[in-house]
Amino acid sequence: MMSGQLITPTPLHNFRPVGGLPTADGGVVRADLVWRSAAPLSQRQPASEAVVGLGVATILDLRDARERASTPGAWQHPSLSARAMPVFEDRLHEIRFADLAELYAVMIDDSGAALARAFSAIAAGAERGVLIHCTAGKDRTGVLSALVLDVLGVERTLVLDDFAQSQQRLGAEYLADLFADVDAENLPGMAAHRATASPPELLQGAFDRIERTWGGSAEYLGAHGVDDDALTQLRKAMLVPASR
């Protein structure tokens, strides 16, 4: 399965694999281990059974506590372990930003440790199946997914294209479900266009910021706590020869 395919086998919005893409050295990232999506919303059918059916064992929720409070009990299933891993460490409501580019700059500069913890959790759980999500599954989830793909050696243009898929998947139906389900005060600074926009320039700006200061994604993650064992574990789990 290629991550660019508009296939949604679950009730979740913006659902797709973090994978299915070729690497620069001739391999391919498996598309059946790590998944990404928007948060589950009550307007949709329960998603737990669907993701368990795909082999997911661990849910990593990147939202802050205020956001999680809007969708309590979303992942109640005996086969699922749901972990709160807030990228903004429960202070998103305090952040003031004029546009998404400013929010991404804050994320890269101030949330490196949180991103590194989530990355390490993906590496530790990949073989058993992981789903990562935030609210729309495009900003926090998009940056974390991009770091995973970049570290695995996927060409930058493909990583950017994958990131931009979110805008195609988050349409009027998503906005209707979102604003019917989530109290506006739990979505600080959000407007409709921010809720769905994912231009590739946003992610490229984040990569530029990382590369100016740290040199690259692996170095950025390492500086914030990801060790070599986690990188090796992720690569071992997710990389296979292209002919497989």
Image (tube, grey):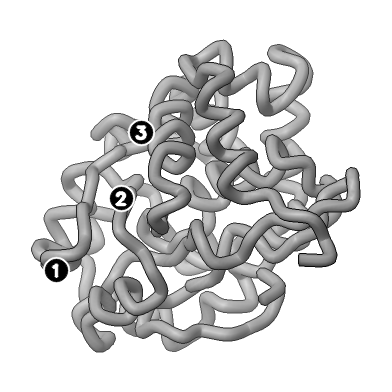
Question: Tag 3's secondary structure?
Answer: loop
The residue under label 1 is 77
Ranked by sequence position, the earlier of labels 3 and 2 is: 2
Which residue corresponds to mark 2?
Answer: 61
The numbered mark at residue 166 is none
| Alpha carbon distance from label 3 to label 2 | 12 Å
Label whose residue precedes the other's in the sequence (1 or 3):
1
User: Separation of disc 1 and disc 2 at Cα?
Assistant: 15 Å
Foreground: 7 or 124? Answer: 124
Q: Tell me which residue sits at (46%, 49%) in the image.
A: 126
On the rendered structure, is 130 left or right of 244? left
Query: Mark 1 against mark 3, which lies toward the viewer?
Result: 1
Q: Earlier in the sequence, mark 1 or mark 2?
A: 2
- Residue that appears at 50% across and 84% down: 8
Q: Residue furthest front?
A: 244
Q: Position of residue 67 (x, y in %)?
A: 23, 52
Disc 2 secondary structure class: strand
Q: Quadrant of residue 16?
A: bottom right
Instruction: Examine the rendering and report whether any part of residue 99 can be seen.
Output: no
The quadrant of the picture occupied by the N terminus is bottom right
Q: Position of residue 158 (x, y in %)?
A: 81, 57
Instruction: Specify the amino acid type for callout 3.
Output: Phe
Total labels: the figure holds: 3
The residue to which callout 3 is attached is 88
Front residue of 170/163: it is 163
Q: Is residue 164 left or right of residue 13?
A: right
Within 10 Å of disc 3 (Cα), the crowding (few <14, some 14-19, many 20+) is many
Type of amino acid at the residue the image marks with label 2 = Asp
